Amino acid sequence: MTALDTLQRDLDTLERSGRRRALVPVQGRDFASNDYLGLAGSTRLREAVAEALARGVPVGSGGSRLLRGNAPEHERLEDEAARFFGSEGAVFLGSGYCANALLFSTLPQRGDLIVHDELVHASAHEGIRLARADAVGFAHNDPQAAAEAIARWRQAGGRGTAWIAVESLYSMDGDRAPLADFADLAERTGAMLLVDEAHATGVFGRDGRGLAGRLDGAENVITLKTCGKALGCEGALLLGPAPMREFIVNRGRQFIFSTAPSPLMAAAVRESLRILRDEPWRRERLHALVGRAQAALAGLGLETSDSPIQRVVLGDDRKTMAAAAALQDRGFDVRGIRPPTVPVGTARLRISLTLNVTERDVDALVGALEEIL
Ligand code: PMP
């Protein structure tokens, strides 16, 4: 069998199990993107990019940050982001995936322990696979289970640092981590706390700083704010104490050996942070949409989330994909999410709410959902 035959066989297996994925053209009303505040196509972001181009900001960075790729726009963004979120240091990276890979593979050292929620994102798992430290998962949103994992490790002779990893808002469930409890646990056990704010950034907290906004600035907290979701851009910011930034610049392979993100994107993200401050109406309108969707979904007897991420767990993969297709046929871009993205037996419709739709769209979607279910 040739190499390509082997790949084809795997694709056939995916097909038979109903898990083969396909790229489809985007159509229908947006109930699928993470563009929560409707910024991706906004006039202000377009104009910020046009203005940056006009004043000579280059399209490409031309190299890694430690070579000639370190543009003034990167440093400006990092300074402003650190100030905005209240941290000592910020590092801008090309994606949240890259930031998570870097975080877990760079900061925890040999002899440390990564203690992570079992539902952390695939990109965190990527970093954990590359990490020098050992790792152990704990039951979703259970600080007690995390505490027990740390205690067991200490009893077995673990002497390094524990790194507790959670998401503030879970991407496929729309539920929140009990952050205050995890912060207490970190304080009590001398652990570091890593909070992935991919889906909370821009949506929650004062001026959209996220759910961990109050923790930013603490010496034992590092947060990841991605720029490709509510901020409407691309890339990610790691925020933490100043030595974190220095260490990443010296030891972060994904930072050192990769071409720096486009300076234009850095300029756009800077504008997004300003929009978060200047246009609170975007968050207000989003939360009003969320409230409306929650009331309507609860009317169908469904469980809801007070976040822009609503899940309708159907369990069966094929049933879920058929329901998504039926909604798509009616003009609603709702996607089905299957394993391995979510645990086996929990396939679901993921309905995201963004300013790209109106209240009327939300009502119509819930009406269609009622018919289909
Ligand atoms: N963390 C979480 C929780 C995510 O949902 C995602 C994106 N799906 C990422 C990290 C990766 O971020 P990016 O899309 O910027 O690579």
Image (cartoon, helix red, strand yellow):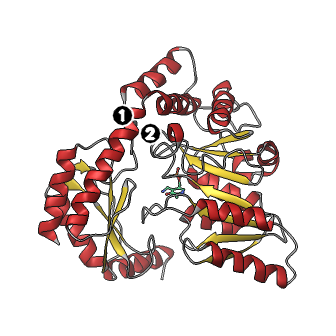
Q: Is residue 306 above or below residue 159?
A: above
Asked whether residue 129 is in view, the answer is: yes
Place residue 71 in its image quadrant.
top right
**How many discs appear?**
2
Q: Position of residue 97 (x, y in %)?
A: 57, 55
Callout 1 crowding tier (Cα within 10 Å): few <14, some 14–19, many ≥20: few
Numbered tag placed on residue 232 in the rendering: 2
Place residue 116 in its image quadrant.
bottom right
| Residue type highlighted by circle 2 | Gly
Place residue 143 in its image quadrant.
bottom right
Mark 1 touching mark 2, by CB under 8 A?
A: yes
Asked whether 160 or 62 is in front, the reply is 160
Q: In this view, does 334 lie above or below 356?
A: below
Tell me what residue is drawn at x 55 percent, y 51 percent: 211
Q: For marks 1 and 2, give the CA distance.
A: 8 Å
Q: Where is residue 310 in the image (x, y as percent from the top left)?
A: 34, 61
Tell me what residue is drawn at x 18 percent, y 64 percent: 369
Asked whether 93 or 14 is in front, the reply is 93
The residue beneath circle 1 is 41
Left or right of 320 on screen, residue 233: right
Image quarter hosting the C terminus: bottom left
Q: Position of residue 42 (x, y in %)?
A: 37, 31
Asked whether residue 331 is in view, the answer is: no
Tell me what residue is drawn at x 56 percent, y 30 percent: 270
Mark 1 and mark 2 lie on one chain; the one further toward the N terminus is 1
